[in-house]
Each structure stands twice: as structure tokens, then as C-alpha cells.
């Protein structure tokens, strides 16, 4: 457990979190490992985990008609994915696949939701950390959508 | 002593010199690279980041950056076919004549980059004007600190100079990260906007100088991301594109606020461009 607490507080997502919070969050965490090509989760399944990447690269994909699996974002060490744990109906809306051997921290979503509900300051702290990730992803998606390179420079 | 090209340019800046296409290579679905030979086999001297006005005879002239190695080899330009002039230029084949006026403008700050870490950020065909800077950085590798290339393209098949980028990736003395906006199954590289690569980058902001070229929107966000990382606005250099006509600061075509892109640029610091980039439809 102590080890997990250290791993968690070393991860950028938890940088600066106070020790008590780290201990609480660590109670919901476990190490996970995936090999290249493994699916971490599939679209449509229950979103019962939240993932922090320690090592390796992960592709988030959706199947597009006639195009097969289309990757819309790749993530690496220090990043997080799987934010659907936070909002009902807690279901994955894309696939997550390991592009290479990955070491992740998997946080149990039910456990984490329970702790955020019971301790709103933990909940608010986690929300403040997730919100910038979500806003950045939204902004980046807009830029991808604009298809900038095709028409300029 | 003035080179032959420089002397001609100095005397008659509006008169193109004649060159011939030596080779033509397809680099991306709508972009071609032309290797040119100046009449009489003269060497063409230029600095990284400078551009030429290229004439497709009977059609017109367009500003095109030099994309070759300033220290060596023929004059090289990489052109995307977007309108009449660029289409005509990209259709020229071996032996065809082409007009060359230049080189014009102020290029990348190679001297200021000495002793510093250099982050080169390219978006799409924006890698073309950066390629001479990359050759110069790698050609005098020990004069610079860490060299990093971050390259964003629309799709894997639109990565310009792909083989060369792969070669750079294999070098031990530079870091190269490529990302695409859209990818299907057979692409195992990064997917996402180029600013993603920047946010993952570990840099010493005080030591870093950045050279950025790509669509204006991309350059705005890359500059902001660099500033967020602590890089000074004076250490971020962007190359601007505006329609050109004379390329010598006389016609006003390329004016951006108080500056002429052709004469004072196309490379400027973000500190200087920031207020101008914020104005829509300049
Ligand atoms: C300093 C400088 C360096 C440049 N370097 C290069 C280079 O290395 N390679 C290169 O391919 N181009 C480069 N350009 C851009 C190039 O000059 C223009 O694309 C060219 O003038 C287009 O001329 P045209 O007659 O073919 O098209 P136009 O008739 O001018 O335009 C036809 C259509 O294409 C659009 N268009 C114009 N320019 C672009 C563009 N760049 N991208 C997308 N759409 C455009 C116009 O809005 C219009 O709708 C550079 C421009 C500058 C100012
Ligand atoms: S193109 Fe004429 S002033 Fe710049």
C-alpha cells in the first residue's frame, strides 16, 4: 500500500495532493499491466476503472464505418484516461488499446466515487484535476476537427 | 564579396533569373519537391528560412520557401498545389524552365540558437521552411544543445519528407516526435494535435529557443503552450505567410500591421507577432 501511495503521488495527476488524500485514493488503486495489442477496455462495457499511465502508450479508438478502428488520441506516461467513470451511465464510449507494454494504475471507479461522495473536498480536488484534462481534450478535438493542415501552410 | 546571385538581385530585384527543373518528387498527396539548377550551374546562396519568388512562365509568381540544405546541393523548393501558380509550378518536370527571384527576407535565428536547446515545431508543409534550419542544426551539431523536432501532420500519408523524418528519428543526437490528427489501423505512432507533444516535452525553458512553422492557428497555440512551459516570447520564432507581390517591401501586399512580412520577416518573434496574431482577418 505504501508503495502504491508513493507511485500515486509521483504521478502528475496527483502532484501536490495532500498525503491524506493520496492514502484515501490509494485505497481504490491497483497496478495493472498490458502487453502490446491488448485491449484495456471496449466500447459499451461498464466504465468501472479510471486509469493513470505510468509507462507505455495507449491508443483510444472508435470503429468508423468502412475505415476500421480509427485512433483519435494516443496517450503516454503521466497522462490519464477513462473519465467515463465519473458520469452516469458509467459506460466506455471508445476502445482503449495498449500500443506497447503498458504499466498503469487502475483506480476502482465505484470505490473512488464512494470516497468522493463521502469526502467532498477529496471529490472537489479530483474534479479540479480532471477538469483541465477534459477541457484540454475538448480543445484539442476542436483543432483536430478543423483539419488545419489541409488548407494552409 | 557579393555572390553572382546576390549581385543580380541587388541590381534588378524584380527580374527573375532562369533556372531549370532537374528533378521532381511527389512528397504528399498535393505537394511536390522541385530540385532546380540555376542557369550556368551557379550556386544559389541563401539562409535557412528565406524564400524565393518562383515564376511559372505565363501563369505568375508565388512566394516559396527554400527547403534544401543551405550548405550543400541544388536549390530545392517544396510546393503545395493550391491555386493557379502553385499548380503550374508543381506540374513542371525535368528540363522545364522556371523563374527565380530571391532569396528574400530574414530567416531563422541560427546565430542566436547557438549554445541553446532548440525545439523545432512543424505543422504540415510548415516543415519545408524549417528543413534548412534542421540541416544547419545537424550540420554543426556541437554548437547547439538538445535538438528536438515535433511534427504534426493531418494523416500519416501526408507526412512530408517522411523517409528523412524516419532517418532523423533514428539519430541519437536529436529527438523526433511525430503526431497525426487522423489515423487508421496501420499507424502505430502518436495521434493528437502537435501541442500534445509539447505538453509531454521535458525542457529547460531558460535555455530553449523555438522555431515554429505551420498554419497560423497552430502557431498561436504552439506559442501559448511554449509560454506556458516558461519559454520567453522573445525566444519563440514563427514564420509567417502572407500573399506577396514585390517581396522587397515596396508594394504593401504583405503588410501585417506595421511590418512587411517580405522584408522584415517571414520569421518574427512571438513577442512581436502576438498582438498581430490576435487581430482577425488582417
Ligand atoms: C514567405 C512565404 C513562404 C512560402 N513558402 C511556401 C512553400 O514553401 N511552399 C508552398 O507550397 N507555399 C508556400 N507559400 C505559400 C504560397 O506562396 C501560396 O500558396 C501561393 O502564393 C499560392 O499561389 P496560387 O496562385 O497557387 O494560389 P492563389 O491563387 O493565391 O490561391 C488559390 C486558393 O488557394 C488559397 N491559398 C493560397 N495560399 C494558400 C496556402 N498556402 N495554403 C492553402 N491555401 C492557400 C487561396 O486562399 C485561394 O483560395 C509561402 C508564402 C510565403 C509568403
Ligand atoms: S510583397 Fe510587396 S511589400 Fe511585401
Image (cartoon, helix red, strand yellow):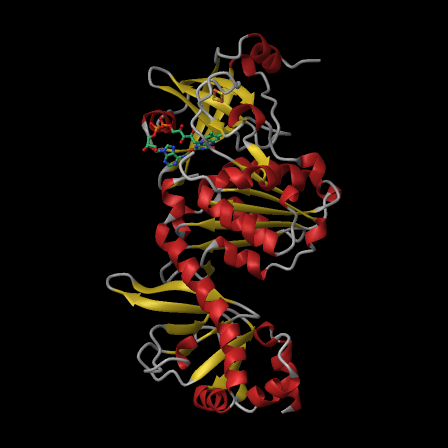
Q: Quadrant of the C terminus of chain A?
A: top left
Q: Quadrant of residue A25?
A: bottom right
Looking at the picture, does residue B31 appear above or below residue B179? above
The structure residue drawn at horizontal position 71% and vertical position 13%, both measured from the top left corner, is: B1
Q: Position of residue A90 (x, y in %)?
A: 35, 82
* Near-viewer residue (B270 or B138): B270
Q: Is residue B52 left or right of residue B182?
A: right
Q: Position of residue B22 (x, y in %)?
A: 46, 24
Looking at the picture, does residue B275 appear above or below residue A128? above
Q: Splitting the image into four quadrants, where does ligand 1 fall?
A: top left
Give the tally of numbered discs. 0
Q: Position of residue A20 (x, y in %)?
A: 63, 88
Looking at the picture, does residue B78 appear above or below residue A103? above
Camera sees residue B193:
yes
* Near-viewer residue (B206 or A35): B206
Extreme top residue here? B11
Looking at the picture, does residue B105 appear above or below residue B123? above
Q: Is residue B251 left or right of residue B115?
A: left
Q: Quadrant of the N terminus of chain A?
A: bottom right
Extreme front residue here? A120
Q: Quadrant of residue A113?
A: bottom left
Camera sees residue A99:
no
Q: Position of residue B232 (x, y in %)?
A: 66, 47
* Near-viewer residue (B171 or B217): B217
The structure residue drawn at horizontal position 36% and vertical position 63%, both measured from the top left corner, is: B185
Amino acid at each position: 500500500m505504501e508503495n502504491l501511495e508513493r507511485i500515486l503521488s509521483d504521478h502528475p495527476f496527483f502532484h501536490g495532493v495532500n498525503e491524506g488524500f493520496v492514502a484515501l485514493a490509494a485505497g481504490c488503486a491497483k497496478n495493472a499491466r498490458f502487453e502490446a495489442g491488448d485491449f484495456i477496455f471496449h466500447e459499451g462495457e461498464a466504465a468501472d476503472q479510471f486509469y493513470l499511465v505510468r509507462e507505455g502508450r495507449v491508443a483510444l479508438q472508435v470503429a468508423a464505418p468502412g475505415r476500421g478502428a480509427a485512433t483519435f488520441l494516443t496517450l503516454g506516461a503521466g497522462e490519464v484516461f477513462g473519465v467515463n467513470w465519473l458520469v452516469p451511465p458509467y459506460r466506455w464510449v471508445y476502445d482503449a488499446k495498449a500500443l506497447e507494454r503498458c504499466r498503469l494504475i487502475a483506480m476502482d471507479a465505484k470505490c473512488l466515487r464512494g470516497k468522493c461522495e463521502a469526502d467532498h473536498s477529496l471529490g472537489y480536488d479530483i474534479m479540479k484535476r480532471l477538469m483541465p484534462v477534459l477541457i484540454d481534450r475538448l480543445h484539442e478535438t476542436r483543432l483536430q476537427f478543423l483539419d488545419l493542415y489541409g488548407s494552409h501552410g | 564579396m557579393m555572390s553572382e546571385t546576390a549581385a543580380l538581385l541587388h541590381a534588378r530585384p524584380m527580374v527573375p533569373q532562369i533556372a531549370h527543373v532537374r528533378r521532381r518528387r511527389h512528397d504528399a498527396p498535393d505537394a511536390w519537391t522541385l530540385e532546380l539548377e540555376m542557369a550556368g550551374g551557379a550556386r544559389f546562396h541563401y539562409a535557412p528560412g528565406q524564400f524565393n519568388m518562383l515564376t511559372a512562365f505565363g501563369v505568375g509568381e508565388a512566394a516559396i520557401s527554400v527547403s534544401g540544405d543551405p550548405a550543400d546541393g541544388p536549390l530545392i523548393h517544396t510546393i503545395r498545389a493550391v491555386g493557379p501558380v502553385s499548380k503550374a509550378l508543381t506540374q513542371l518536370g525535368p528540363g522545364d524552365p522556371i523563374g527565380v527571384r530571391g532569396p528574400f527576407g530574414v530567416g531563422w535565428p541560427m546565430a542566436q540558437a547557438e549554445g541553446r536547446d532548440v525545439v523545432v515545431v512543424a505543422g504540415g508543409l510548415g516543415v519545408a521552411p524549417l528543413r534548412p534550419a534542421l540541416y544547419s542544426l545537424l550540420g554543426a551539431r556541437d554548437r547547439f544543445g538538445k535538438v528536438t523536432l515535433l511534427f504534426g501532420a493531418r494523416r500519416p500519408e501526408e507526412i512530408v519528407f517522411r523517409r528523412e523524418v524516419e532517418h532523423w528519428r533514428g539519430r541519437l543526437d536529436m529527438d523526433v516526435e511525430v503526431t497525426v490528427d487522423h489515423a487508421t489501423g496501420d499507424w502505430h505512432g502518436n495521434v493528437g494535435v502537435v501541442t500534445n507533444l509539447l505538453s509531454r516535452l521535458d525542457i529547460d525553458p531558460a535555455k530553449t529557443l523555438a522555431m515554429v512553422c505551420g498554419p497560423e492557428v497552430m502557431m498561436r497555440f504552439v506559442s501559448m503552450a511554449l509560454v506556458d512551459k516558461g519559454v520567453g516570447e522573445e525566444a519563440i520564432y514563427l514564420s509567417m505567410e502572407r500573399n506577396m507581390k514585390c517581396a522587397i517591401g515596396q508594394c504593401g501586399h504583405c503588410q501585417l500591421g506595421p511590418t512587411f512580412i517580405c522584408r522584415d520577416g517571414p520569421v518574427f518573434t512571438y513577442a512581436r507577432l502576438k498582438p498581430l496574431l490576435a487581430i482577425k482577418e488582417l
